[in-house]
Image: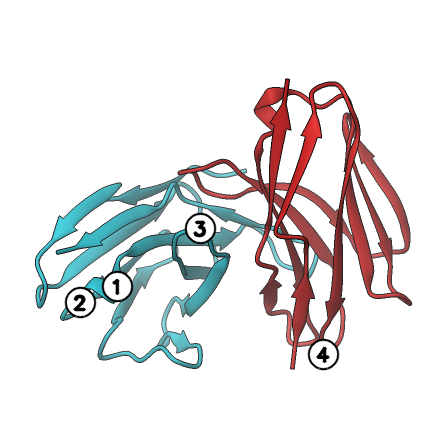
Chain colours: A red, B cyan
Amino acid sequence: GQNIDQPTEMTATEGAIVQINCTYQTSGFNGLFWYQQHAGEAPTFLSYNVLDGLEEKGRFSSFLSRSKGYSYLLLKELQMKDSASYLCAVRDSNYQLIWGAGTKLIIKP
Amino acid sequence: SAVISQKPSRDICQRGTSLTIQCQVDSQVTMMFWYRQQPGQSLTLIATANQGSEATYESGFVIDKFPISRPNLTFSTLTVSNMSPEDSSIYLCSVELGQGGNQPQHFGDGTRLSIL
């Protein structure tokens, strides 16, 4: 079967750095997406990786290793507004999006 | 990006009734998707709505329970039929704005549905 694993919840301190991991086992791979979802709101697109390596977008970076079936989202200079759930999703060989359960990130002052 | 409008934003319904959710996009898109998200959980794809053909339903979802319309390239509806408390959830529509595997899905604001 297809599976995406993320930690259920993480806690970090304002101003710090946090890394949210995602491991996947899917039938084929055609890219990995990270989304942010604030409570009560819809998911919003953060980043896309299809080749190995690091993609940087301001305070957020996303890394991919296809051989390891692994990605992480790195959030720097954490702000209280970064408190949200972060969803990892993989596009499989049929171009279907397989969604992880999400990681709830709690930022403390 | 695109503006994706979903209506209603929330509703409280009686058991046994049906509700139709609308999703309007401000640009033409080939594929529209309908998801369910139960509290504290991730997204579950209900079906993919393609213009000009029948919707494609995922395992565990059937057309009689979740009929979908896709009359044109900017609009779709999802009906939740004969509702029960187990249907209480957030329903989300999403679109892919271009073609190719690198296109993310963009979501409407969702419909928060509570069944009494």
Task: Give the mark toward the camera: 3 or 1.
Answer: 1
Callout 2 secondary element? loop
**Which quarter shows the N terminus of chain A?**
bottom right
Q: Can you tell which mark lies on residue B84?
A: 2
* Vertical arrangement, residue A49 with respect to residue B55, above or below: above
Look at discs 2 and 4 and give the one toward the viewer: 2
Q: Position of residue A60 (x, y in %)?
A: 76, 32
Closer to viewer: mark 3 or mark 2:
2
Tell me which chain the residue with mark 1 is part of.
B
Residue A20's disc number: none
Residue tagged by mark 1?
A: B87
Labelled pair 1, 2 in contact (Cβ < 8 Å): yes
**Amino acid type of the residue tagged 4 in the rendering:** Ser
**Residue at left 45%, top 42%?**
A42
Circles 1 and 4 on the same subunit: no
Q: CA distance from mark 1 to mark 4?
A: 30 Å
